C-alpha cells in the first residue's frame, strides 16, 4: 500500500510532467489596440515570451533599461525573448511610449 | 465648432466646411469664420504671403484603410499646385513614411519634388525614426539641424520653429521635447520682439489633446513658458489625422488632416490607428491646409479636403 501511494505521487507530481516536456515554455503577449495584453505577466525562469503585433500600426518592445529591444514590428510580426534571470522587467513601445508592460520572472 | 467638440461628426463637418470654402481667422485668440474670397484680395499687399501644410503621407502603408497612400499623396500635391502655386513654402509635419524604410523615403522624395512651391521644410513623425539610429531620416533631412532634428528660420518677418517630439520618448510618457531642445528653444526666442509672429510646426500635438492615446507632449508647459510673452503663436501639427483646433492663451493649435487615412476621434474606438471608411468617402476625410500671413494681422488657417 505504501509503495502504491509513492508511485501515484511520482506520476502526478509536477516534476514528472516537466520531465515529459523538456522544451522551454512559451508565453504569448498580444499587441492590440495600442496595448500589451496581458499587460503584466509572471513567468518562471527559462520561459520564452513571444510578443505578436496584431495592430495595423507598427510597434516595438523595448525594456526600460534598454536590456532588450525589438526592431519595429509590422502587422503579424513577432519578437521573443527568453528570461533566464529572476527579476521584474518593465518595457514599453518606443514608438508609442504610453504603451507599457512588465514581465516578472520568478525562480 | 467648439474647441471640445472633437467628435467624429464634428471633425467631418469641420473638414467639410474647409472644403466648402470657409476661412478661419484668428483674431485676439477667437476663431472667426468668413466666406472664402472675402479676404483673399488683401493677399496682394506687400509683405503678405501664404504657405501650405501637408501631413502624414505614410508612404509605404498599403492596408485596408488606404491601399494606395502614394496616390492620395500625389492628389494632395496636385491640389497644392493648383490651389496654392504661389505658396512661399511647404511644411511637412511628419510621418512622411510608414516604416522608415529607405525605399519609402526615396519614393516620398520623388513625390515631393513634384511640388510647385520649391521651399520645403520637414519634421519627422515617429514613423520616420523607427530605425534605431534614425539614419534613414537624418541622412536625408538632418543637415539643416546638424542631425538634432529641431531648427528655426525666418520668412518675411515670421519666425518658424521646427520642434521634434518623437525622438526623446520615455516609458509611460507622451511626446517629449527633452531638456536639450528646450534649452535651445529658450535661446532661440531670446531677444526676439514679442510682436514677431511665431509659427511652430511639429508632429504630435503639443497640448494635452488625449493622453490615453499618447496625443500630447509631456514637457510642453516648459516650452509654453518661453512663448507666453509673444502676441501670436500658431502651432501646426499632424499625428492624429484629423482637424482639431484649440486656443491656449495666445497660442492657437491646429491639428491637420492626413493625406493617407483618418483616425478615430479621441476615445471613440478601442485605440488610435487607421480608420477604414467607405472607399468613396476616403478623400473627403483627407486634406491639406493653406495658411495666409498678412502684416499686423493674425494668421488665417484654411483646411481643404481632397475630395
Image (tube, grey):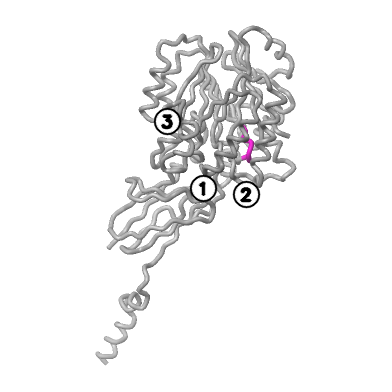
Whether B276 is drawn above or below B55: the answer is: below
* SS for dot 2: loop
User: Any mark on residue B63, and which?
Assistant: 2
From the top left corner, tell me how far across and down residue B200 is, in percent: 51, 23
From the top left corner, tell me how far across and down residue B92 is, in percent: 57, 30
In the image, A76 versus B247, the foreground residue is A76
Would you say the residues marked 1 and 3 are in contact, meaning their CB atoms lie under 8 Å apart? no
Which marked residue is nearer to the observer: mark 1 or mark 3? Answer: 3
The answer, for residue A39, to whether it is visible in the render is yes
The answer to whether dots 2 and 1 both sit on one chain is no
For the point 68% across and 22% down, the residue is: B84
Circle 2 chain:
B
In the image, B95 versus B86, the foreground residue is B86
Whether B33 is drawn above or below B286: the answer is: above
Whether B298 is drawn above or below B162: the answer is: above
For the point 67% across and 29% down, the residue is: B14
From the top left corner, tell me how far across and down residue B99 is, in percent: 52, 44
* SS for dot 1: loop
User: Any mark on residue B147, and which?
Assistant: 3
The answer, for residue B250, to whether it is visible in the render is no
Does the magenta segment cover residue B46?
no
Which marked residue is nearer to the observer: mark 2 or mark 3? Answer: 3
Whether B197 is drawn above or below B263: the answer is: above
* SS for dot 3: loop
Location of mark 1 (residue): A58
For the point 67% across and 31% down, the residue is: B77
Amino acid at each position: 500500500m505504501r509503495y502504491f501511494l509513492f508511485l501515484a505521487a511520482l506520476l502526478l507530481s509536477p516534476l514528472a510532467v516537466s520531465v515529459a516536456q523538456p522544451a522551454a515554455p512559451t508565453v504569448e503577449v498580444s499587441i492590440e489596440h495600442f496595448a500589451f495584453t496581458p499587460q503584466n505577466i509572471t513567468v518562471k525562469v527559462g520561459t520564452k515570451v513571444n510578443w505578436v503585433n496584431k495592430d495595423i500600426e507598427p510597434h516595438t518592445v523595448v525594456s526600460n533599461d534598454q536590456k532588450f529591444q525589438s526592431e519595429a514590428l509590422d502587422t503579424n510580426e513577432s519578437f521573443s525573448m527568453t528570461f533566464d534571470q529572476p527579476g521584474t522587467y518593465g518595457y514599453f513601445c518606443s514608438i508609442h511610449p504610453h504603451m507599457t508592460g512588465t514581465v516578472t520572472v520568478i525562480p | 465648432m467648439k474647441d471640445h467638440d472633437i467628435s467624429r461628426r464634428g471633425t467631418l463637418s469641420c473638414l467639410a466646411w474647409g472644403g466648402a470654402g470657409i476661412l478661419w481667422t484668428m483674431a485676439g485668440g477667437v476663431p472667426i469664420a468668413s466666406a472664402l474670397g472675402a479676404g483673399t484680395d488683401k493677399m496682394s499687399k506687400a509683405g503678405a504671403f501664404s504657405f501650405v501644410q501637408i501631413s502624414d503621407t505614410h508612404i509605404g502603408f498599403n492596408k485596408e484603410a488606404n491601399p494606395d497612400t502614394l496616390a492620395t499623396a500625389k492628389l494632395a500635391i496636385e491640389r497644392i499646385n493648383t490651389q496654392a502655386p504661389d505658396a512661399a513654402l511647404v511644411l511637412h509635419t511628419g510621418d512622411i513614411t510608414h516604416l522608415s524604410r529607405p525605399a519609402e523615403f526615396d519614393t516620398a522624395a520623388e513625390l515631393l519634388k513634384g511640388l510647385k512651391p520649391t521651399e520645403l521644410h520637414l519634421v519627422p513623425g515617429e514613423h520616420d525614426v523607427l530605425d534605431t539610429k534614425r539614419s534613414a531620416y537624418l541622412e536625408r533631412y538632418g543637415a539643416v539641424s546638424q542631425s538634432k532634428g529641431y531648427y528655426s528660420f525666418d520668412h518675411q518677418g515670421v519666425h518658424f520653429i521646427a520642434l521634434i517630439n518623437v525622438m526623446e520618448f520615455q516609458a509611460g510618457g507622451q511626446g517629449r521635447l527633452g531638456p536639450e531642445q528646450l534649452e535651445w528653444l529658450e535661446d532661440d526666442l531670446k531677444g526676439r520682439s514679442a510682436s514677431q509672429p511665431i509659427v511652430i510646426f511639429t508632429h504630435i500635438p503639443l497640448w494635452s489633446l488625449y493622453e490615453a492615446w499618447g496625443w500630447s507632449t509631456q514637457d510642453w508647459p516648459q516650452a509654453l513658458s518661453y512663448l507666453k510673452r509673444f502676441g501670436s503663436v500658431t502651432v501646426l501639427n499632424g499625428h492624429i489625422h484629423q482637424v482639431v483646433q484649440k486656443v491656449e492663451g495666445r497660442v492657437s493649435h491646429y491639428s491637420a488632416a492626413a493625406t493617407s487615412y483618418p483616425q478615430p476621434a479621441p476615445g471613440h474606438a478601442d485605440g488610435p490607428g487607421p480608420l477604414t471608411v467607405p472607399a468613396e468617402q476616403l478623400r473627403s476625410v483627407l486634406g491639406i491646409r493653406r495658411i495666409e500671413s498678412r502684416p499686423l494681422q493674425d494668421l488665417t488657417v484654411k483646411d481643404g479636403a481632397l475630395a
